[in-house]
Image: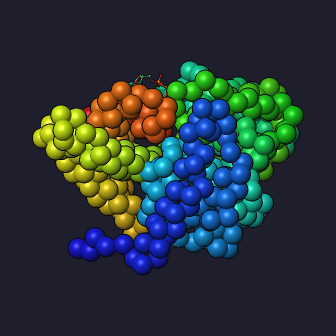
Amino acid sequence: MDFSLTMEQEILRKSVRDFAEKEIKPKARELDEREEFSYETCRAMGELGLFGMFVSEEYAGQGLDYISYIIAVEEIARIDGSHAATIAAGNSLGIGPLYYYGNEEQKRKYLPKLCSGEMLWGFGLTEPNAGSDAGNTQTQAVLDGNEWVINGSKIFITNASTDITAGVTVLARTGIREAGKKELSCILVETGTRGFEARPMHGKLMWRASNTSELYFDDCRVPEDNRLGPQGEGFHQMLGTLDGGRLSIGAMGLGGAQGCFEMARRYATQRVQFGKPIASFQVNSFKLADMAMEIELARLLLYKACWLRDNHKPYAKEAAMAKLYCSEVMYRCANHAVQLHGGYGLMKEYDVERFYRDQKLLEIGEGTSEIQRLVISRLIGVI
Ligand SMILES: Cc1cc2nc3c(=O)[nH]c(=O)nc-3n(C[C@H](O)[C@H](O)[C@H](O)COP(=O)(O)OP(=O)(O)OC[C@H]3O[C@@H](n4cnc5c(N)ncnc54)[C@H](O)[C@@H]3O)c2cc1C
């Protein structure tokens, strides 16, 4: 068994870490406060090669393995959840479906600009009445001549209403199967298409500098050729996309937990009460020890899931486990980190406050923790 990363992966980690410390850290608190998506850092992340990381060079991607991508998300999340969300959603949810299921023409048309970070793409699965029960999609697409006519709405869609969003992949009902089940297909809708509107959502507790949108389709017409892959394959494509996406949410949990641990360790070794650093009280050093141990376990589980994916082995169970475990580790680490900071941990001047809020999404997005437990229960054959 070889637990070491390659030299290229180590170099990538260092360069993303340096970038996040230098370019994101000084701005993250203010962007969060102002609820502002930063085009400047998004462009810089593109220049660093953080979009299209697992896409082959043929389509202007970086041609890296999945573990490299996950390390990059982890390092950005160590500094800021919102920027990590832009990268994770940009790669796994925006680029992923186009790369894995798109035809040659679609890939050539969209991927180069998405892989450079000049453009973003959204993934429209969730609807007001179809969240965890994503198969209950109400949005409908009806073929009229050689055009799809789409009606319906989506909610909570990341990266879908920025000034650089080129479009979204939309899951829609395209018919009824023989057994009476819905036929679902994915359709590409470009920004600016008549009848399509993406409205930014405001007032989030977390990921406040990441773009989240509601999508509305009102007799929105797109060419029949905008279907992604075969008709009726949409739900499978979405589920496949979420398996990969879960690894990136796991990376956000791992990186966020690491950030919390480092802030907590630094503070606890410097803050003096009763004449001693608070880390010297066993109740506090044990918190730090638990954090370090759980982060180690989270990293092993997440990297193993990535290794399975990179080696073309089944990884759905490990992806669900990694997403669930890493997000819950970050929950515990953020909680300990704020506790160790005492009253200061509740103030915006201390980044642990932002990490404490950002953590919550990880237990909800891309399948809640309850749904991960359901997925794992199915995959271990008990339900
Ligand atoms: C900031 C943000 C960004 C997002 N980005 C995207 C995106 O880019 N694309 C996209 O498509 N979606 C996105 N989402 C949506 C996200 O994936 C959903 O919010 C999530 O899947 C949960 O759906 P819901 O909010 O409708 O909750 P619900 O499904 O209504 O769940 C509510 C509660 O009920 C529980 N529950 C539901 N069903 C069961 C069950 N069978 N057994 C046990 N408990 C159950 C859930 O676990 C949860 O605790 C985003 C959400 C947020 C907040």
Q: Return the residue nearer the eye: 176 or 204.
A: 204
The residue shown at (74%, 32%) is 198
The residue shown at (25%, 39%) is 272
Residue 123 placement (x, y as % from top left): 62, 42
Q: Return the residue nearer the eye: 374 or 94.
A: 94
The residue shown at (54%, 50%) is 25
Residue 263 visible in the shown view: yes
Q: How many labels does the image show?
A: 0
Residue 369 visible in the shown view: no
Vertical relation: 47 (above or below) 290: below
Q: In this view, does 376 lie to the left or right of 345?
A: left
* Residue 383 image-quadrant placement: top left
Residue 47 placement (x, y as % from top left): 67, 64
The residue shown at (28%, 70%) is 3
Vertical relation: 63 (above or below) 137: below
Q: Return the residue nearer the eye: 119 or 234.
A: 119
Q: In this view, does 150 lie to the left or right of 12?
A: right
For the N terminus, the quadrant is bottom left
